[in-house]
Image (cartoon, coloured by chain):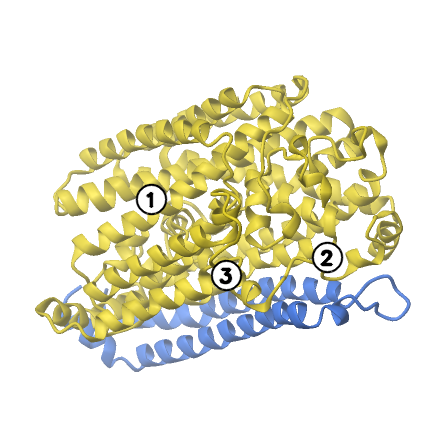
Chain colours: A blue, B yellow
């Protein structure tokens, strides 16, 4: 890729938007995932009693729905990112590409 | 758990025990050992033979399509996102996940879930930070990405080392596990099983390259997901599809009673917990055979779709293993037919899921699940071998020795020679390690991937001031730290080397070795004032534009 294309892409406002918006979104979701996972891990490490406490009269404890929540959250948050990237971010990068004719 | 300390119950714990031991599960950590050879199981052997014949036909078809180095490494980039998602799941869901996690649930209930979650949470991180950048910057191996703007030689040598070390540890654990598993499931001798796995993986990779490997992984993923779904469905059907009734019954039947519904001994101290979680989360994003799969799809869009499919299948699979573990508590743990005179599970606790297969589906389904477990190992070792072969042929031979001047034919030939060498080495190591404790190897592979491969990839792609020197030195420091701390930890220092007490007290080195890796890259980059450092930093702009937009990416803009 030559220097000319690099400079033209960098000057494109779409590129600036793509870069900053995707970076912000990606990092927000990364932190969300880390908080959920390490939160769950720390809850297990520091509050075993709570995780093993039954919910009402049911045999099911708090740990079970929380664990399932982490699994579902993992899949969902991936889906949320992919959905936005495959529509909005791809549209932006297509526009950038069309502009520089690459 | 006392039954683990008895030699004959030690079964094929290498793979399953590997992971459990790493997680600090006290009772699974002691030395593993030899399973008792079972009666020859013809149903399982016939079903497995059907799988082998089917995959060999696919290999023949794939061989006709594998002409260039690009076909060999990436199936010509023609895999769809959905197919690649299944293949990634097939690459990642090992026999250790299936048998080890269901065994952990069978033994301790809830603790098995904590463990399963760790294996899933790395996928979003790959999606958000790596997948599309990998696809946009790389062609065949993750070294293409890490070395994009750097001096090729040092980074390629590092990346090839990181790849081969990870592949070697992962491969040995799989080979030893395969031998033990087959001894138990099929009633064949250990060495026959290891040689069989070695030959089949060589044939797949040698003739069919990435195309055959991908389809072996897809078929295996479909078989494993179907089999596990059927088992979970059958278990739940007995309780009118009420998980609460299943759990109720399990707490009444399990020796530990209500304790199985909450965390037990799995997490001993918070540092081990976080460290092990980091090894799994970031190690997933640094496994060379997984990263390589992102180059098989035609665009960044398909790369993202594939990781979403993979996450969905893997998440679904871990929910199934949780149900299967509880199913084993109620249907296997209570049935004297599955136990020996002393009341321990026949073949060891890792057989919980296999016995459950017989309990819910009879002998034919038992044969099916046994064959699937073997197919699972084959799919994983084929992916590992391909990844190791690419590191040698593409990174070392074509880029370092031939300085990028190798022809596609020569590169392809070197890959094939390497595949044969790796196959032979894997078989020899598998036989050599038969009686060794390999419990630490898979977790070490994850720790190295998290401490060496991941930091180098991450910093080279996202940090402008990263230089050749920083990435190489930092990467090797992370790698060395992960290996040294693992040797000093309980799983090697006490369990293999038979010392009295571990020098490194935590279950996983990742929290320290990742820090060393990142700090090393940072320190040796910012102090780097050489002429090469200027070129490295100047190259960031162009790299960033390509990583973000895919302009100039292989296959993406039709050139």
- Mark 3, residue position: B281
B108 shown above or below B188: below
- Labelled disc at residue B164: 1
The mark nearer the N terminus, 1 or 3, is 1
Q: Quadrant of the C terminus of chain A?
A: bottom left
Q: Quadrant of the N terminus of chain A?
A: bottom left
- Residue B97 point in image, percent of width and height: 59, 46
Residue at screen point 57% across, 40% down: B31
Q: Residue at x 76, y 72 (%)?
A: A50
| Chain identifier of the residue bearing label 1 in the image | B
Mark 3, mark 2: which one is toward the viewer? Answer: 2
Vertical position of residue B191 compared to residue A66: above or below:
above
Picture quarter containing residue B391?
A: top left
What's the chain of the residue with tag 3? B
Residue B506 seen in this snapshot? yes
Q: In this view of the protein, which residue sits in the foreground, B1 or B468?
A: B1
Specify which label sits upstream in the sequence, 2 or 1: 2
Look at the numbered disc 2 and give the secondary structure of its residue.
Answer: helix
Is residue B152 positioned above or below B102 on the image?
A: below
Please say if the residues under marks 2 and 1 sit with CB atoms less than 8 Å apart.
no
For marks 3 and 2, give the CA distance. Answer: 20 Å
Residue topped by disc 2 = B110
- N-term mark: 3 or 2: 2
Q: Is residue B39 left or right of residue B157?
A: right
In the displayed image of the protein, which residue is found farthest to the front? B500
Q: Is residue B493 left or right of residue B465?
A: right
- Respond whether the residues carrying marks 2 and 1 are from the same subunit: yes
């Amino acid at each position: 890729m030559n220097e000319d294309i690099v400079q033209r892409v960098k000057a494109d406002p779409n590129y600036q938007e793509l870069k900053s918006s995707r970076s912000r979104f990606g990092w927000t979701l990364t932190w969300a995932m880390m908080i959920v996972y390490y939160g769950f891990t720390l809850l297990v490490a520091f509050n075993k009693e709570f995780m093993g406490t039954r919910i009402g009269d049911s045999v099911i404890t708090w740990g079970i729905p929380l664990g399932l929540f982490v699994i579902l959250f993992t899949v969902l948050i991936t889906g949320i990112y992919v959905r936005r990237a495959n529509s909005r971010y791809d549209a932006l990068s297509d526009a950038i590409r069309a502009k520089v004719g690459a | 758990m006392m039954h683990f300390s008895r030699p004959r119950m030690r079964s094929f714990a290498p793979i399953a025990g590997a992971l459990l031991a790493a997680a600090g599960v006290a009772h699974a950590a002691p030395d593993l050992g030899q399973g008792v050879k079972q009666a020859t199981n013809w149903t399982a052997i016939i079903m497995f033979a059907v799988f082998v014949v089917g995959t060999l036909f696919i290999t023949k078809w794939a061989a006709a399509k594998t002409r260039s180095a690009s076909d060999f490494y990436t199936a010509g980039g023609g895999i769809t996102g959905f197919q690649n998602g299944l293949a990634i799941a097939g690459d990642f869901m090992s026999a250790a996940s299936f048998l080890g996690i269901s065994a952990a649930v069978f033994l301790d209930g809830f603790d098995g879930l904590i463990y399963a979650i760790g294996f899933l949470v790395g996928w979003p991180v790959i999606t958000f930070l790596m997948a599309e950048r990998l696809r946009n910057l790389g062609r065949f191996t993750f070294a293409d990405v890490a070395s994009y703007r750097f001096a090729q030689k040092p980074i390629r040598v590092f990346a090839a080392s990181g790849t081969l070390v990870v592949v070697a540890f992962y491969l040995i654990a799989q080979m030893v596990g395969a031998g033990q598993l087959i001894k138990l499931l099929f009633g064949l001798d250990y060495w026959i099983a290891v040689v069989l796995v070695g030959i089949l993986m060589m044939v797949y990779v040698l003739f069919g390259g990435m195309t055959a490997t991908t389809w072996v992984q897809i078929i295996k993923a479909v078989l494993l997901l179907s089999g596990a779904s059927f088992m979970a469905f059958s278990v739940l059907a007995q309780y009118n599809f009420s998980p609460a009734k299943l759990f109720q019954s399990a707490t009444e039947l399990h020796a530990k009673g209500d304790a199985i519904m909450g965390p037990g001994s799995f997490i001993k101290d918070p540092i081990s917990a976080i460290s092990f979680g980091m090894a799994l989360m970031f190690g997933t994003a640094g496994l060379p055979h997984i990263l390589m799969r992102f180059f098989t799809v035609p665009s960044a869009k398909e790369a993202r779709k594939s990781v979403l499919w993979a996450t969905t299948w893997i998440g679904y699979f871990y929910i199934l293993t949780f149900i299967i573990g509880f199913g084993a508590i109620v249907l296997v743990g209570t049935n004297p037919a599955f136990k020996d005179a002393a009341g321990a599970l026949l073949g060891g606790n890792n057989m919980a899921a296999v016995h459950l297969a017989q309990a819910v589906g009879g002998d034919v389904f038992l044969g099916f699940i046994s064959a699937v477990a073997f197919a699972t190992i084959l799919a994983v070792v084929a992916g590992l071998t391909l990844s190791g072969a690419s590191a040698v042929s593409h990174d070392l031979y074509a880029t370092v020795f031939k300085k990028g001047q190798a022809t596609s034919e020569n590169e392809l030939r070197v890959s094939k020679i390497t595949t044969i060498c790796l196959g032979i080495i894997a078989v020899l190591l598998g036989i050599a390690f038969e009686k060794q404790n390999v419990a630490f190897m898979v977790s070490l592979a994850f720790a190295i991937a998290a401490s060496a491969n991941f930091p180098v990839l991450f910093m080279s792609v996202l940090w402008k001031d990263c230089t050749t020197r920083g990435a190489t030195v930092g990467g090797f420091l992370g790698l060395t730290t992960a290996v040294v701390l693992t040797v000093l930890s309980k799983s090697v220092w006490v369990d293999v080397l038979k010392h009295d007490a571990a020098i490194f007290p935590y279950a996983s080195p990742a929290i320290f070795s990742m820090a060393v890796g990142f700090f090393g890259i940072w320190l040796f980059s910012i102090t780097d004032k050489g002429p090469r450092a200027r070129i490295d930093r100047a190259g960031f702009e162009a790299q960033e534009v390509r990583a973000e937009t895919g302009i100039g990416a292989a296959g993406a803009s039709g050139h």
